[in-house]
Image (cartoon, rainbow, N blue to C red):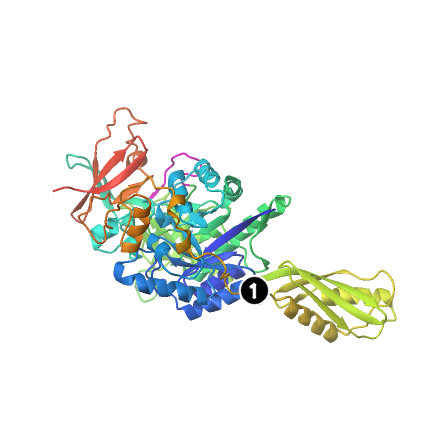
Amino acid sequence: MPVALELLAPARNKDIGIAAIDCGADAVYIAGPAFGAREAAGNSFADIAELTAYARRFGAKVFLTLNTLVYEQELEAARRTVFQAVEAGVDALIVQDLGLLRMNIPPIELHASTQCNIRTVEQARWLASLGFSRLVLARELSLEQIREISQAVPDCGIECFVHGALCVSYSGQCWLSQYLAGRSANRGCCVQACRSRYDLLDGDGRVLVRNKALLSLKDLSLRDRLEQLAEAGATSFKIEGRLKNISYVRNVVRSYSDALDGIVRASGGRYVRSSWGSPVGGFTPHPEATFNRGYTHYFIDGKRGQWCSAEYAKGVGELLGEVRSAGPAGRKGDGQRGGTVMELRLRRDLSTPLANGDGLCYVDGSGEVVGMRADTVDGSRVSCSQTVSPAPGTPVYRNFNRTLERELENNLPVRLIPAVIRLYSESGMFRLEAGAENGRTAVLDFNAEQARDRDKAAAGLRAAFSKRSGIFSFTLDWLPGEGPLPFLPASGANALRRELALRLETPPLNPDMTAEAPSGRLAPGSIVPPLQRRQLNCANSLSREVYRAAGVEPDTAFELDPSSPVELMRCKYCIRYETGRCPGLNPEEKAVPLYLLNNGRRLKLVFDCARCEMAVCRVSG
């Protein structure tokens, strides 16, 4: 059996979800009205039902993010949310809080969120034993670690992030936002403290690095590593971005869908896509030209790199080139200064030529991102109304590509499902038989006059039936070798083709209600106890029951008990390594604590060199 590969796209709302499917997504993930880990991305179940109905047409799936901690008083509301999700046609829930496993809920597929801290074989076995059908792995894993987990839980689907923003902390193990602002990342309210600027201090209070976004990582991009991920056992490739706009989602999804299609075509039948149809026509994707903080492969090769975005935590977009010269543009007729003229040394491989209206930016000497608008472009010469003074050699980025944005809005692809038509004749009657990629077939009998010129009729039939109708792209691939052919005017052929499309369209399907409810899967004898015993995010009595059944007495979640002795973060990322202070690389360095300072708040950095990890902790006293 071929392995089905899934491209999983983010959807802030229904319209973005539909756009993702049109651009090639096999599945989308979206939040309901509550309990989604992006507070600003909630949706009504009426909208979600419309999205699931649209997805069904292409065999695509819709997953609901129910991936926050659930407090005791919210358990019933969470349970009702599951019922509403099932009624709306949702295919699976992405879950963080294990309390859902003890609820009386309808049968529905459950995916363990990356918030479950899935970065070891032991954690994967624990969650698989609880009945999760898919595991969303931590972003920090190498190909070898992904392969080990996949082999350890062969009955679980493996989902990996492949594109988008990177949290510096292991997911589900970050309480920095809660500590600093009382807003929990585990509750969908993260203030993104990792994107703030900090000073780095040594134990004596000396400033080693000043005013840098030292915890801000570049964005992930694994488009060129999808085949290796599939070989390691991943079958779902996830794009981050439930707060991103529709043009971002279109651009990135189309790019990754094209890449997956190429892998499938070259696989000799080893791989297939998990949904039907492909986007046809429309814009050419350029993911490098949309929002990003610079790209990284992160730890996919099991090696460290320079992961910190430092100077541009807010994103800078596509590198255009560098400044050759910059100076005043002179004076306008009213006597006011006329802004700046820059001469740029442009890269040759730009996504689109630099154009009037593009947004540009550069990082100045103080580390601030300075933005401007390209009012007039003449080759490599740019005039802008702002007065700026980038030094020669300064890199310049394009953070708004007007040409591409217009393409992403106006030149859209159409998703079509391939289908073939065969024409038969018998006893003066004609029959059309159609079969589509979605497995549906249709038969249509009709009467028509016999054509006098058989060759001319054959050419006309091929032209008339090899067209698009509805969501299908038809090809007439067989005609009888002898005997009569029908004479059909264009209107008649079009009507027959449209009727075949209607009959081929897959009707909406209800979720499988015969599967076992999640609560019935928790047979104590089958549970594999977790190795992790601390910082388990236990926020309600049902979650506590799950852990107790495995012989673990969990601490109360930090959100409910701020006195809990938790690390505020644990990271694969290491500031010592990034700043050239790693004792493993520089024997003169010692693994002593360092400190981060922001607006008078101090954080202690502790380096676990045995595990090659860094922890961010409160300063005692």
Locate the C terminus by quadrant.
Answer: top left
90 in magenta: no
The spot of residue 372 in percent (x, y) is 36, 56
Q: Residue at x 38, y 39 (%)?
A: 122
Q: Please indicate, yes or no, whether residue 471 appears anywhere in the rendered image.
A: yes
**Depth order, front residue of 251/256:** 256
Q: Secondary structure at mark 1?
A: loop
Pointer 1: what residue?
A: 57
Occupied quadrant, residue 528: top left
Occupied quadrant, residue 182: bottom left
The spot of residue 498 in percent (x, y) is 67, 71
- Compared to residue 326, the image places residue 358 above or below, namely below
**Depth order, front residue of 410/23:** 23
Occupied quadrant, residue 70: bottom left
The residue furthest left is 621
Q: Residues within 10 Å of mark 1 (few under 14, many from 20)?
A: some
- Compared to residue 231, the image places residue 350 above or below, namely below
300 in magenta: yes
The spot of residue 30 in percent (x, y) is 42, 60
The residue furthest top is 587
Q: Main secondary structure of the magenta part?
A: loop
**Depth order, front residue of 234/356:** 234
Q: Residue at x 83, y 62 (%)?
A: 480
Q: Which residues are magenta?
A: 298-309
**Depth order, front residue of 94/350:** 94
The spot of residue 523 in percent (x, y) is 39, 49
Q: Please indicate, yes or no, whether residue 191 appears anywhere in the rendered image.
A: no
Q: Amino acid at mark 1?
A: Arg
How many numbered dots are placed on residues in this image? 1
